[in-house]
Image (tube, grey):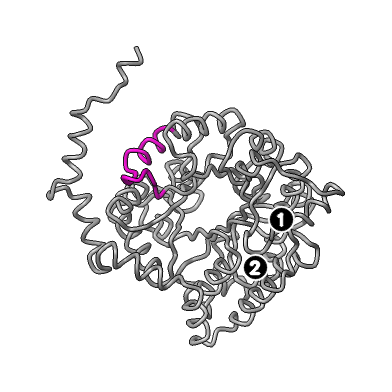
Amino acid sequence: MKENLRFDPSAVEAVSSYLTDPSNPVVSRLLEVMAPYGTPEEINGKARAAGELDNLLGRLEAEKSPYLSDVLWLKERRDSGDFVSLAEYRRSVVGSDLEISKEAQDRAVTLEISALQFFPWLIAEAKQAIEKKEVMPGRFIRVRNMAEQVADQGDILAVAASMKIMGASLVESLDTRGTDGSNVHLGGPDTITGYFGGIGQPNDYCYRWVDEFLKYYTQYGVQQVLNINSGTVLLGYLLYRLGVDIQFKISVFMGNDNPAAALWTLMMARFLAREDGTTPLAGFNLSNSCDVETVKAIADIRKALGLEKDVRIEHHITEPWKHIVRQPYCRRDDLLDLAASVGNISAKHEGGDPEVEGALDDPASLTDYFIPKADILAQGLMEKLQRDYLLKHDSLNHTARSLTEKGFAFLAAPLLHSRS
């Protein structure tokens, strides 16, 4: 019976013919959006130059950014070896030298934090990590309004430069989403069912999303962005096939919560990979409802399709106390199970440990991400929101300790934490 599932070569050829047909409106519109930015080679060249550390520092200096001194401080602390080494960190956890096997090193869990909304939070986190001999994340997610970042005295540049200094990966969330009134289903509680179908990229918004990506890619070197819609996922695949070195992670809001859904997503990543087998799908954030067996099954699919090295499976370990999941929510024990056999996974910390956040009078909410900075300052919320971010950092270090106690490896900011 399974032979009935084999693809008909003529069907594959039909899709290929349609994608290359000059009259194809999907690809034709994509090429129109790309045209003002140049050829793929020119686009990638602009992005590489924009993302070079020296250029980022030069632009901060030219803007007279108040953040430049802290960026340089971070670089000095890195060069001085002020951050704890991995060997020292492991000794502090287990009381002696700990030899991590090569197999465990190959399955190192990426320590991920979300969301780094404001550059000063990163410096507060780094100072705490130095003082307490903690590890810094190897992967950062941002959900702050992009236009606001650009207007905020070089915030976008300072964060990008800091990632280069730390050797960490960064994901930005573009502003082109259906939450700005373009999606008629989304409003207040009276339109709550609109959210069940996802945030959305209605009508021409999928191409506006591409345009916004190309803008920040060429001007700031922002290479990796959040992807929340099946249309923009497809356009991301096509953009990569055309030669633009986009990377994206699929959001938890897309709701990939079972092996069949994951197979659908990964099949397209495989079909639209480049000739060298690479794909722009760098991160695959599964639904919070996924259990251990589901994650393992999805990892098996990923391996069977030859995507294990390219596609990181990202799973939330913690979430903000309010407005996203039923609490208490903590998947650290699940992670320890997965780390024994599944490679290229990340542990995403989007909330403090539930026993900590749940005891607060004013715990974190996912809706905090969408408060404009002006309103945060007017309401005196910045200190509280930075506290919430540092609770995520604490939770991430709890995960690092738990992995170490089990003899597992993790990936923290690689240029800050030497092995010896």
In reply to whether residue 52 is colored magenta, the answer given is no
Q: Position of residue 316 (x, y in %)?
A: 61, 45
Disc 2 crowd rating (10 Å Cα; few below 14, some 14-19, many 20+) is many
* Side of 359 relative to 210 (left or right): right
User: In this picture, which residue range is highlighted in magenta?
Assistant: 263-280
Residue 265 falls inside the magenta stretch: yes
Q: Name the amino acid, label 2.
A: Leu
Give neighbour class at mark 1: few <14, some 14-19, many 20+ (Cα, 10 Å): some
What element does badge 2 sit on?
Answer: helix
**Circle nearer the N terminus (1, 2):** 2
User: Along the horizontal axis of the image, is 232 left or right of 386?
Assistant: left
Quick check: 94 left or right of 417? right
Please, is residue 30 above or below residue 329 in the view?
below
Q: Is residue 389 above or below residue 105?
A: below
Q: Nearer the viewer, residue 65 or 74?
A: 74
Question: Where in the figure is residue 343, as x and y percent of width and height?
Answer: 58, 39
Image mark count: 2
Tell me, for residue 363, which label it has, or none.
1
Describe the element under mark 1 as helix, strand or loop.
Answer: loop
Residue under label 2, please give it.
122
Q: Residue at x 56, y 43 (%)?
A: 344
Q: Which residue appears farthest toward the top when viewing the image?
A: 1
